[in-house]
Amino acid sequence: MKSLILASAIAFAAASTAGADVNLIINGDFDTDVPPWVKVNDNFAIVWDAADSAGMQGSGSARVTSSQVDQGGPMNGGAGAQECIEVVASAPYAVSALYFIPSGQDRTAAPDIGIAWFLDSNCQTTALPPEQSLIPQGESTTDMWLSLSGDVVAPDDSHSANVILRPRKVEAGGSVDVLFDAVEFVPEPGAAALGATALAAVAIRRRLLSCSTS
């Protein structure tokens, strides 16, 4: 029955995918918790925070803590909290998030978003270069919600991507906290030409997964 529902949903969604803004991220608004987002390694932590970018009651954000030095700059590594999503090879995507750096910290953050591409659909087998795309580095201004946004194109043969929220701690020692909210990974209009059915299938599977975990 579930496969029949999925097939019907894909057939219906494929007709409208080209004009729809389908966010492939699950729980990018962090209303009550942070899963399926997880820390990349033990140099980081991710917890739910009651502060919300829109000031909404009953919603919140993700507080990502870094104790690792990740100086800014393109293709300079970096990590934080990540979520694996399915993508369509060669398709263009718009990526965005809001971030907030609390004041009173003794370390500087220069946040950005990293995208690591994979050959399989579960972020297990690394794809061909570019292995990582970067959304431009944000400012270090504190106590303000600021935006990160940019465009990426999935490499040929890639089928999944880790979207990584990265605090980017500049100085050695200590740790720094950055709040992230309103995370989006949306197929751009040109992606429809590469296969509306494939994009719709990805979106529907993400929705089913989201429903099963809520």
Image: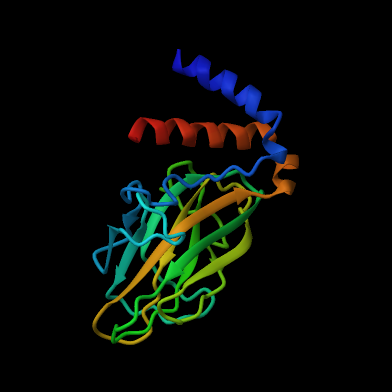
Q: Residue at x 32, y 64 (%)?
A: 63
- The image shows residue 78, relative to residue 7, as above or below, that is below
Q: How is the image coloured?
A: rainbow
x, y percent for residue 198: 62, 34
Q: Residue at x 60, y 25 (%)?
A: 10
| Image quarter (top left, top right, bottom left or bottom right) of the N terminus | top left
- The image shows residue 72, relative to residue 191, as above or below, that is below
* Residue positioned most to the top: 1
- Left or right? Give the position of 53 relative to 159: left
- Left or right? Give the position of 96 relative to 58: right
x, y percent for residue 128: 56, 56
Q: Residue at x 52, y 73 (%)?
A: 75
Q: Quadrant of residue 195?
A: top right
Q: Residue at x 50, y 80 (%)?
A: 139
Q: Quadrant of residue 201?
A: top right
Give the tally of numbered discs.
Answer: 0
Nearer to the camera, 73 or 178: 178
x, y percent for residue 213: 34, 35
| Image quarter (top left, top right, bottom left or bottom right) of the C terminus | top left
x, y percent for residue 205: 49, 32
- The image shows residue 212, relative to residue 45, as above or below, that is above
Nearer to the camera, 33 or 94: 33
